[in-house]
């Protein structure tokens, strides 16, 4: 979340940047400053009374020592009144603090200056594209039909076991899925990311720490009895490793990668654009995450983008990179680049990765700081990205590598699958 001190000191800039995302920017910021002014005023009064009580307490002790018990008891009566006033003010202060916190949770991150202004995905800016879109035979079919033809993914069986959006991978389909996971992890660790395994459920504090709560509460599966949430991405447990942590500057950057299943209760719609693997409630994803010094975070973001480019080039999939506009930017992100693979059989682009810099937004929620060269505590920057989300990568491979003889496996994956073709 945004820092109140920054809002107070840069009010005009904050409103201007936030206006890219919401028409209520000025109203929200004015409300924050009003509550903060009340909070600071109450805090000042509580501090004055606390100081006065400390002075009187010492005076009472001296009076008792010098045999002036009567006068000391008069002072004790005064402290009772002060304590009651302090209790009342402290209650008002706590209310103001809670109100301020609740309001700050509703305010999204400030877009970076280079984020294009826009209201929807139609306003995203394509900044790069690569790869050759293959020419398929006239018999080419979409991946959900390929899955049935070669018996590698069973959507009906998943629907029987659980419901729509929970496919069952079978035979070479399961092995290709596993191959992709291992390949992504190997690429990430070779690039310097440290592999970890994390829980697939998190507590409420973790959800608030990375910004999934309260913004995306309706999209997360909740285990009511235990008050735990199934993770929508490895970003949540991996980033929360650093919650309430004070790092040394010399420890930066922190770089992690993790494979997890992901669970999302996204409201489904109908049509070819959400068929098959295009939108699932459970899917596999390999994530990369960085905790960076603020001065290096955007260089690190560029490095993450280049890293994902290298993976897609090895897979020989046609792809493009989009800079998201303000209207399509995630709630917690300052800048996001989306990667999309072109599905030739569907004739459309499929999102397969988002790479984001959150600047200090998550770190402020997490209380994630580092001690800088001057010995002062400073908020770190957090970044994360999909490297990669499997369903649409798999869909792109199945559709773009299909031939009349079968589905060829990308050359880089053959050592992982142990086979060259699905037939």
Image (cartoon, helix red, strand yellow):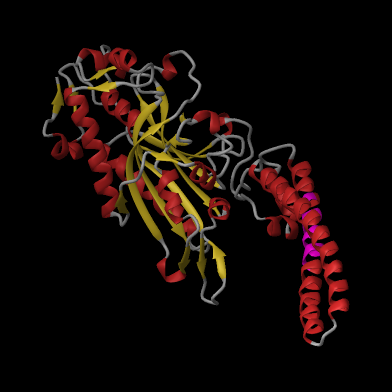
* Quadrant including the C terminus: top left
What residue is rendered at 51% in x and 29% in y?
Answer: 219
Residue at image coords 45%, 13%: 271
- Does residue 143 appear left or right of residue 65 in this picture? left
Q: Which residues are magenta?
A: 35-47
Looking at the image, can residue 137 be seen?
no
Q: Is residue 66 left or right of residue 330?
A: right
- Secondary structure of the magenta portion, mostly? helix
Q: What x and y, as percent, mark residue 57?
A: 77, 75
Question: Image quadrant of residue 65?
Answer: bottom right
Can residue 102 be found in the magenta stretch? no
Q: Is residue 114 above or below residue 244?
A: above
The answer to whether residue 131 is above or below residue 369 is: above
Please state the horizontal and vertical placement of residue 41, each as a whole percent of the image: 82, 59
The answer to whether residue 248 is left or right of residue 325 is left
Q: Is residue 63 above or below residue 184?
A: below
Q: Residue at x 13, y 30 (%)?
A: 420
Viewer-closest of 161 and 119: 161
Which residue is at 80% across, 64% downward?
A: 44
- Furthest residue to the left? 418
Magenta residue check for 40: yes
Give the mark count: 0
Q: Nearer the viewer, residue 71 or 396?
A: 71
Observer-nearest residue: 45 or 52? 52
Position in image of residue 87 (x %, y %): 77, 56
Question: Left or right: where does residue 309 sit relative to residue 78?
Answer: left
Along the line of sight, the residue nearer the viewer: 74 or 156: 74
The answer to whether one can see residue 229 in this image is: yes
- Residue 37, how many percent across, how many down? 80, 55
């Amino acid at each position: 979340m945004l820092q109140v001190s920054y809002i107070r000191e840069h009010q005009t800039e904050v409103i201007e940047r936030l206006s890219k995302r919401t028409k209520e920017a000025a109203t929200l910021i004015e409300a924050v400053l009003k509550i903060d002014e009340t909070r600071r005023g109450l805090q000042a009064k509580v501090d004055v009374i606390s100081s006065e009580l400390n002075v009187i307490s010492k005076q009472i002790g001296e009076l008792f020592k010098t045999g002036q018990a009567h006068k000391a008891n008069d002072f004790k009566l005064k402290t009772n009144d002060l304590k009651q006033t302090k209790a009342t003010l402290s209650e008002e202060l706590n209310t103001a603090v809670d109100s301020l916190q609740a309001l700050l949770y509703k305010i999204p991150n400030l877009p970076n200056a280079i984020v294009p202004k826009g209201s929807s995905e139609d306003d995203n800016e394509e900044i790069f594209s690569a790869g050759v879109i293959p020419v398929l035979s006239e018999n080419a079919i979409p991946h959900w039909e390929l899955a049935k033809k070669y018996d590698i993914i069973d959507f009906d069986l998943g629907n029987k076991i659980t419901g729509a959006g929970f496919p069952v991978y079978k035979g070479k389909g399961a092995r290709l899925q596993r191959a992709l996971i291992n390949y992504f992890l190997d690429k990430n660790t070779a690039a310097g990311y440290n592999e970890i395994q994390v829980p697939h459920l998190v507590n409420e504090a973790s959800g608030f720490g990375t910004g999934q709560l309260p913004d995306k509460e309706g999209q997360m599966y909740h285990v009511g009895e235990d008050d735990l949430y199934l993770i929508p991405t490895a970003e949540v447990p991996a980033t929360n490793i650093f919650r309430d942590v004070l790092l040394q500057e010399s420890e930066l950057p922190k770089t992690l990668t993790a494979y997890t299943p992901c669970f999302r209760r996204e409201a489904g719609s109908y049509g070819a654009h959400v068929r098959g693997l295009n939108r699932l409630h459970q899917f596999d994803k390999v994530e990369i995450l960085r905790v960076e010094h603020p001065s290096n975070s955007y260089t690190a973001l560029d490095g993450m983008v280049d890293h994902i480019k290298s993976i897609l080039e090895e897979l020989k999939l046609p792809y493009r990179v989009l800079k998201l506009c303000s209207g399509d930017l995630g709630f917690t992100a300052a800048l996001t680049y989306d990667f999309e693979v072109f599905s030739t059989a569907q004739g459309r682009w499929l999102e397969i990765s988002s790479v984001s810099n959150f600047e200090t937004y998550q770190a402020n929620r997490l209380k994630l700081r580092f001690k800088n060269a001057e010995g002062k505590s400073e908020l770190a920057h957090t970044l994360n990205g999909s490297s990669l989300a499997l369903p649409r990568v798999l869909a792109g491979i199945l559709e773009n590598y299909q031939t009349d003889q079968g589905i060829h496996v990308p050359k880089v994956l053959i050592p992982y699958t142990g086979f060259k073709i699905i037939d």
